[in-house]
Image: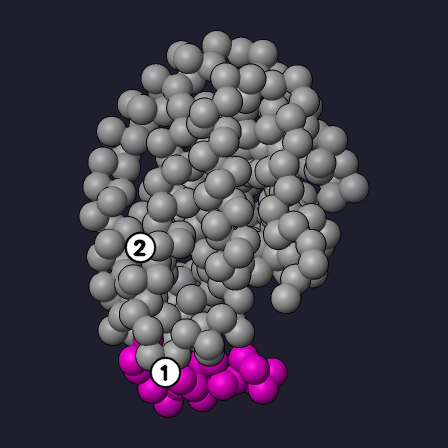
């Protein structure tokens, strides 16, 4: 049992800093997902919060779902799991009528990538890496990745990196619009906090209305997509490819999908 808070938060100058706190990789377990949901719930209710800054503690933003919990949940529905965990969190981020800025340090992979992409803006360390991740363990994209990634970088690029599981570098992410800004890794937290403070000092209500418009024009089918991702994930989770992918991950060897 963990003896630390898996998510911490602090409020300063209208900016609520939400920190994912399971270093090294900040992999999501049930406790961390629930804590993140609670933090965004409080952000929505607190009028003192004008902007949210989401960052990972340590060397990673988030490597995604904790593989150990996948093994413990063997035989349960991935769709049901998503309906109770990542889907509500993704919807909270998109529905929060305040700017949400992700500061991506190190890797953002799998569900961690989905959470980062659900945010309105992203500032990344110059050594950050964006990894779709799911195909490496024989799964389909979930946590909104199937919607956000093609919307941001195009279907062709999204397919290439979903199929290959290769990382998108920080420089490439900036060129393609996956990241809005880059910062030296040592200065990421400082530059992200300064940007978040600028946002908090701006016309937040107008930004909220702009966010509503973007949701309506670009992501009008978010709920349906999240549910369909769960349906596909139930299919993928029963496959031999998934079994092989997880075994290879745990044994630290290349997967043999053929």
| Residue 30, position as x, y percentages in the image | 49, 59
Instruction: Identify the residue at image location x=28%, y=63%.
Output: 79
Question: Which contiguous range is marked in magenta?
Answer: 237-258
- Work out whether 173 lies above or below 204: below
Tell me if mark 1 has few (under 14), some (14-19) or many (20+) residues whose alpha carbon lies within 10 angstroms of its own: many
Instruction: Identify the residue at image location x=52%, y=61%.
Output: 29
Quarter the C terminus occupies: bottom left
- Say left or right for 185 vs 109: right
- Work out whether 190 lies above or below 115: above
User: In the rendered image, which quarter is residue 24 located in?
Assistant: bottom right
| Residue 105, position as x, y percentages in the image | 65, 47
Instruction: Identify the residue at image location x=31%, y=55%.
Output: 83
Q: Secondary structure at mark 2?
A: helix
Q: Is residue 117 visible?
A: no
Quarter the N terminus occupies: bottom right
Q: Label 2: which residue?
A: 83
Q: Secondary structure at mark 1?
A: helix
Q: Earlier in the sequence, mark 2 or mark 1?
A: 2
Which dot, 2 or 1, sits closer to the camera?
2
Toward the viewer: 17 or 176? 17
- Say left or right for 87 vs 39: left
**Does the magenta run of residues contain 257?**
yes
**Does the magenta run of residues contain 226?**
no
| Residue 76, position as x, y percentages in the image | 33, 73
Q: Is residue 111 visible?
A: yes
Tell me if mark 2 has few (under 14), some (14-19) or many (20+) residues whose alpha carbon lies within 10 angstroms of its own: some
Q: Could you tell me how far apart the alpha carbons at marks 2 and 1 are, in whole angstroms?
A: 23 Å
- Work out whether 58 lies above or below 176: below
In the rendered structure, find residue 241 and report the number of the disc placed on it. 1
Toward the viewer: 186 or 45? 45
Instruction: Identify the residue at image location x=24%, y=50%.
Output: 225
| Residue 176, position as x, y percentages in the image | 47, 42
């Amino acid at each position: 049992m963990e003896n630390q808070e898996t998510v911490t938060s602090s409020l300063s100058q209208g900016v609520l800093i939400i920190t994912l706190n399971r270093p090294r990789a900040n992999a999501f377990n049930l406790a961390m997902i629930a804590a993140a949901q609670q933090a965004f719930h409080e952000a929505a209710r607190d009028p003192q919060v004008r902007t949210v800054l989401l960052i990972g503690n340590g060397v990673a933003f988030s490597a995604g779902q904790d593989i150990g919990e996948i093994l413990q949940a063997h035989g349960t529905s991935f769709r049901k799991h998503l309906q109770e965990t990542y889907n509500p969190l993704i919807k909270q981020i998109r529905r929060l009528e305040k700017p949400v800025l992700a500061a991506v340090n190190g890797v953002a992979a799998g569900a961690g990538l989905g959470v980062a992409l659900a945010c309105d803006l992203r500032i990344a360390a110059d050594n950050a890496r964006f990894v779709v991740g799911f195909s490496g363990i024989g799964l389909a994209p979930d946590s909104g990745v199937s919607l956000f990634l093609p919307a941001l970088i195009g279907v062709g690029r999204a397919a290439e990196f979903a199929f290959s599981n290769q990382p998108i570098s920080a420089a490439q992410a900036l060129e393609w619009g996956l990241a809005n800004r880059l910062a030296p890794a040592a200065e990421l937290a400082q530059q992200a906090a300064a940007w978040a403070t600028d946002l908090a000092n701006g016309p937040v209500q107008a930004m909220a209305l702009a966010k509503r418009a973007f949701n309506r024009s670009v992501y009008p089918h978010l709920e349906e997509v999240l549910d369909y991702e769960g349906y596909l994930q139930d299919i993928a989770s029963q496959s031999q490819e998934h079994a092989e992918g997880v075994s290879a991950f745990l044994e630290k060897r290349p997967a043999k999908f053929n």
